[in-house]
Image: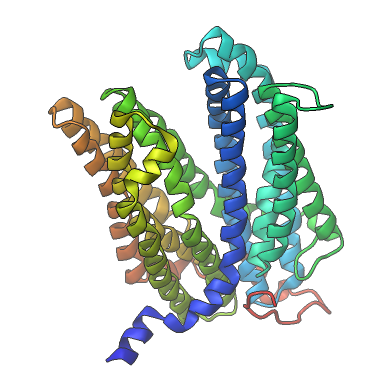
Amino acid sequence: MRGAIRDRLATATWPELVGLGWPVSLTLLVRVTMRTIDILVVGMVVGSAGVAALGIGDAAMRVVLMTGLGLGAGTITTVSQRVGAGRVHEAKVATTQSALIAVAVGVPCTVAGLALAEWYFRVLGAEDDVVAIGAPYLRIVVATAVARLLAVMLTRAFQGAGDTRTPLVVRTIGTGLNIGLTVALVGGPGPFPELGVQGAAVGTAVGNVVSAGMLIVLLARNHRSVGFVRDGWWAPSTAKRILGLAWPQIIERNIFTVGAIPLNAIVLTFGTVANAGFQIARRVQLYALLPSRGVATATSTLMGQHVGRGEAAEGERRAHGGLSLAFVVSLVVGLPMVVLARPIAGVFVDEPDAVAAATDWLRVYAVVVVFRAVYGVYREALQGAGDTRSPVVSTAVGIVVFALGASWLFGIALGLGVGAVMAGVVLDPIARVALLGRWFSSGRWHRFVRDDPDLAPDHRPAGDDEPVAARSPR
């Protein structure tokens, strides 16, 4: 009986998933902490106008980030499947094409950001003082959109090849520079100039450029099983493969990002205190999700590599292991959020009403964390198999029908209050898990397996056919 349960949960795959996933989680922790420090430093030195400028500017850059993560889905799937098939050269072609796509997408983002920064702040209703400091912040940061996209997509190339530690080192160095420059340039201690919010922008820009530059240098040296190859600069079939996988993920991730705007408006109808509690809980949720996000990325890599080798059953076994591990990890993180909700809330605010609101929202998001963790693994497992479309449908249903629709209908239109909004927020990831779980179990993802035209036998280059094991780095 116990053996059957272990087989079903695939707990034997946990060490492999942890070995591949922990550097991903640590990389994300570094990035989230950097953003938190930016807000704290700007808040202390510049004040509320600075925090507002930072938040509004970052909302625009999140569209760039979500687009990069969507494109990165095409990269990690294509690279992992080719590495799993032993087609190292084709994996390098995919890496080269990913870099070109990052440049092609990033340049228009920079041009639009530079031209429309002030208009963007004004159309959102920002006050003049916020526009005055926010528009320059956005222009500095968006000037490095190419570097930001390169860092995201090349990181996913390394991860697809099974190397999650190199991106950890690179992104830690870049983020360390970001944090150091932010602390030095926002307030201007000692010999440093006091640049205010623009100092945070310079820190972010330098961190982006350094991270992208280090990844480019490593790939130019053909690091491990990924790198740049000369014949990869013109590979339209590979570009089509990456973009074909990426566009549904770009839509799915931006649905989630854009959906946060009306959800904020819905919560704000119940007052500033309710919205403050909501914001605190969402910030804590970012940290709570980090362990499971590492598991999800490891699942995507292993699924892709096994699918590339024609071992769909082994890939599915890693997916089951990822699901069970993410569930356990999220419970371990979520339970303390329930028990310690009030002390955690007290770290951020001290007004009794705000503490009470944040406490309630933290307990709501403790439940959300569990379902979002499971959903993340389902999404990444399907992505590794080549199905990036199903998550778009599940996310649209979850956000439009429950997080927004049910919250507005029951919370505002029918007057049931903020509790109904909380219910809608919880039902969103539950609906997504139910849909993706059903589709994954049905096996519909098998039709996406090995549909990469460049994995056909006649595309194997001579002398570059060594097999690559699906394993975490030693």
The location of residue 336, given as percent across then percent down, is: 36, 57
Q: Residue at x 68, y 68 (%)?
A: 163
Q: Is residue 241 visible?
A: no
| Quadrant in which residue 461 is drawn | bottom right
Is 38 left or right of 414, judged from the image as shown? right
The quarter of the image holding the C terminus is: bottom right
The location of residue 115, given as percent across then percent down, is: 67, 18
| Quadrant in which residue 133 is drawn | top right
Q: Residue at x 70, y 52 (%)?
A: 171
Q: Residue at x 37, y 66 (%)?
A: 327
In this figure, what is the number of numbered marks?
0
Is 331 left or right of 46, judged from the image as shown? left
The answer to whether 282 is drawn above or below residue 231 in the figure is: above
| Quadrant in which residue 227 is drawn | bottom right
The answer to whether 323 is drawn above or below residue 409 in the figure is: below
Q: Residue at x 24, y 36 (%)?
A: 421
The quarter of the image holding the N terminus is: bottom left
The location of residue 293, given as percent across then percent down, is: 50, 58
Q: Is residue 287 visible?
A: yes
* Most foreground residue, 385 or 18: 18
Is 220 left or right of 384, judged from the image as shown? right
Residue sitting at the far top = 128
The answer to whether 351 is drawn above or below residue 206 in the figure is: above
The location of residue 273, given as percent across then percent down, is: 32, 26
